[in-house]
C-alpha cells in the first residue's frame, strides 16, 4: 500500500495555508492550556492564542529552543499526561542531557504515515524489502523508518547499525531492495563491498533512503554510482517528530515538507527576523498535529532555503534544499563563515579524493588554522612525491578560491579516518571558544 495523499500533497497554496491556520490555532490553544513554558512565555508578551488570526501573526510568537527543552527536562514540554504517552525517544545530542520527546498513539500513527509518505515519494512500495541500518534505540531514525515501511506494507529487516559485513550478507541473501542509513554509512557499505569483491550492481538493491546528517550532491552521485542505486534524501529531527518532516520525490530537487503537519519559516539566525521566500537562513518549524509534544517555532539551527514552485511530480508541498550546515556548526575561520558542506563539495569535485575527510580547526596565537585531512585513493597516495605535491596544491588553491580561507591539506592513509556507522563526525575544533 503506497501512502499517496494528493488531497494534501497537491493542495493549492491557499488551501494549505487555510488548513495550516486552523491547525495552528488548535495547537496554540492546546499548548497554552497544557504547557507551562508556552503559557508563561505568551503571557510575558501579552499574547493569547486568539491573537493569531493569520499565518503572518505566527511571527509574533516567541521561538522555542533546545535550551527551553533542557530547562524543562524531562517531561515539562509534554502537552498530555504521561499516561497518554506510548513512546519516548530522545535527540542525538552529544553534550549535556539529551532532550526527551514523547508520542501518543495518535502521534505514532501520524508519524508512521508521514514516513510512509516520503518513502512512497521515493518509489518504495509493498514489494520492497527494506533494510534498516540505523541504530534502534532512543534515536528516532530506525523506529521512524521501520514503522513507515510497515505502513507501506514493505518487508522490513530491522538490522540496526554497524556490523557492515553482516549487513552486506543480509543484503545479498534476503534480497534487500531499499537501504535505510546515514549517507556516510552507505559509503562505508559500498567500500566494504568493494573490498570483499562484491559487485553491488549484481545485488537487488535499487533505492537508498538516506538522512540524519548533511550530505552534498557530489556525495549523492558517488553513492549512486558505487551502489548502482537511486539515492534519496530525507530530513527530520526528534524535537519535531523524527524523520518524516521532509523527503525527496524522485525528481530529487529538494525535500517536500509535509506542510499539512508542519509550518516552515526561514529566519535570519542572528536577528530572528523572518526572511522572504527563497532566502537562505535557519529553518524554524511549528508542528500542527502533534498531541504529546507540540513545538511552536522550534529553531532547528539547520541552514537551508525553501522553494515554493510546484514540483514536476505534482506535489505543491514546499521543498527545502539540502541543508548547508547548522547555524551552530558553522565555523568562523579567520572571520570567514565556513560550512563543512562547502568543503565537501570542493573535495568531491577533485578526482582522487575519497569521500572521507576530517576538518581540524585550531588556533596558533591569535590566528585560526584549518587543516583538511583527506583520505586519498591508493594510487595517488603511493605515487611519486611530485605528483602528490601537485595534487595538494590543486586542492589548497581550490579551497582558497571557494572559501576565501586558506587551509593546509594533508593526505592521510586509506582507512585512517574512523568510519561512521551512524552520523559522521567531520569537524574537530580545538580552539575552545
Ligand atoms: O536525525 C532524525 C532523522 C533520522 C532524520 C533519520 C532523517 C533520517 P536527530 O537525531 O534529532 O534526528 O537529529 C536532527 O540531524 O537538525 C539536522 O541537523 C540533521 N539532519 C537530519 N536529517 C538530515 C538531512 C534525526 N537529510 C538533526 N540532511 C537535524 C541534513 C539532517 N541534516
Image: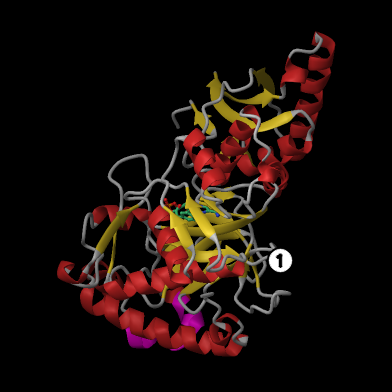
Residue drawn at x 62%, y 66% is 123
Residue drawn at x 68%, y 22% is 408
For mark 1, give the secondary structure. loop
Q: Is residue 420 visible?
A: no
Q: Is residue 433 visible?
A: yes
Question: Would residue 279 be found to the left or right of residue 60 on screen?
Answer: right
Question: Would residue 301 be found to the left or right of residue 224 on screen?
Answer: left
* Membership of 263 in magenta stretch: no
- Give the residue pinned by disc 1: 251
Q: Position of residue 405 (x, y in %)?
A: 70, 32
* Membership of 54 in magenta stretch: yes
Q: Is residue 30 above or below residue 87?
A: below
Quadrant into which the C terminus falls: top left
Q: Nearer the viewer, residue 282 or 347?
A: 347
Q: Nearer the viewer, residue 87 or 194?
A: 194
Q: Where does the magenta region start and end?
A: 48-58
Q: Position of residue 233 (x, y in %)?
A: 60, 57
Q: Nearer the viewer, residue 6 or 278?
A: 6
Residue drawn at x 59%, y 30% is 359
> For the stretch drawn in magenta, what is the main secondary structure?
helix
Q: Is residue 298 above or below residue 258?
A: above
Instruction: Specify the color scheme.
Output: secondary structure
**Mark 1 neighbour class, 10 Å CA radius: few under 14, some 14 to 19, many 20 or more:** few
Q: Residue furthest front?
A: 173
Q: Position of residue 315 (x, y in %)?
A: 64, 78
The quadrant holding residue 11 is bottom right
Question: Would residue 27 be found to the left or right of residue 189 on screen?
Answer: left
Q: Position of residue 201 (x, y in %)?
A: 70, 45
Q: Residue furthest top?
A: 385
Q: Nearer the viewer, residue 73 or 348?
A: 348
Residue drawn at x 58%, y 65% is 124
Amino acid at each position: 500500500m503506497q501512502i499517496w495523499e494528493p488531497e494534501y500533497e497537491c493542495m493549492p497554496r491557499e488551501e494549505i495555508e487555510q488548513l495550516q491556520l486552523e491547525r495552528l490555532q488548535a495547537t496554540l490553544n492546546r499548548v497554552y492550556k497544557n504547557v507551562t513554558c508556552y503559557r508563561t512565555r505568551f503571557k510575558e508578551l501579552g499574547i493569547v492564542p486568539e491573537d493569531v488570526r493569520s499565518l503572518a501573526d505566527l511571527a509574533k510568537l516567541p521561538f522555542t529552543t533546545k535550551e527551553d527543552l533542557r530547562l524543562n527536562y524531562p517531561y515539562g514540554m509534554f502537552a498530555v499526561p504521561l499516561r497518554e504517552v506510548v513512546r519516548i525517544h530522545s535527540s542525538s545530542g552529544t553534550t549535556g542531557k539529551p532532550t526527551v520527546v514523547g508520542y501518543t498513539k495518535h502521534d505514532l500513527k501520524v508519524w508512521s504515515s508521514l514516513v510512509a509518505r516520503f518513502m512512497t515519494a521515493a518509489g518504495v512500495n509493498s514489494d520492497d524489502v527494506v533494510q534498516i541500518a540505523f541504530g534502534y534505540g532512543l534515536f528516532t531514525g530506525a523506529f521512524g523508518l521501520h514503522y513507515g515501511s510497515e505502513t507501506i506494507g514493505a518487508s522490513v529487516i530491522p538490522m540496526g547499525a554497524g556490523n557492515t559485513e553482516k549487513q552486506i550478507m543480509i543484503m545479498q541473501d534476503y534480497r534487500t531492495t531499499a537501504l535505510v542509513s546515514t549517507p556516510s554509512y552507505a559509503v562505508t557499505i559500498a567500500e566494504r563491498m568493494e573490498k570483499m569483491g562484491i559487485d553491488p550492481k549484481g545485488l537487488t538493491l535499487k533505492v537508498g533512503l538516506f538522512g540524519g546528517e548533511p550530505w552534498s550532491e557530489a556525495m549523492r552521485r558517488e553513492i549512486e554510482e558505487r551502489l548502482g542505486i537511486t539515492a534519496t534524501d530525507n530530513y527530520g529531527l526528534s524535537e519535531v517528530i523524527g524523520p518524516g518532516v521532509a523527503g525527496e520525490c524522485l525528481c530529487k530537487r529538494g525535500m517536500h515538507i509535509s506542510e499539512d503537519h508542519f509550518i516552515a519559516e526561514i529566519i535570519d539566525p542572528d536577528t530572528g527576523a523572518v526572511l522572504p521566500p527563497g532566502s537562505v537562513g535557519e529553518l524554524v518549524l511549528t508542528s500542527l498535529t502533534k498531541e504529546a509534544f507540540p513545538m511552536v517555532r522550534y529553531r532547528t539551527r539547520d541552514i537551508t532555503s525553501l522553494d515554493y514552485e510546484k514540483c514536476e511530480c505534482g506535489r505543491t508541498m514546499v521543498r527545502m534544499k539540502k541543508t548547508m550546515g547548522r547555524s551552530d556548526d558553522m565555523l568562523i575561520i579567520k572571520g570567514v563563515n565556513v560550512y563543512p558542506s562547502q568543503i565537501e563539495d570542493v573535495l568531491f569535485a577533485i578526482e582522487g579524493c575519497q569521500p572521507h575527510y576530517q576538518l581540524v580547526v585550531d588556533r596558533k596565537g591569535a590566528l585560526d588554522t584549518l587543516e583538511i585531512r583527506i583520505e586519498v585513493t591508493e594510487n595517488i597516495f603511493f605515487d611519486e612525491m611530485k605528483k602528490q605535491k601537485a595534487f595538494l596544491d590543486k586542492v589548497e588553491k581550490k579551497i582558497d578560491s571557494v572559501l576565501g580561507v586558506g587551509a593546509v591539506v594533508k593526505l592521510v592513509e586509506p582507512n585512517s579516518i574512523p568510519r561512521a556507522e551512524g552520523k559522521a563526525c567531520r569537524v574537530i575544533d580545538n580552539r575552545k571558544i
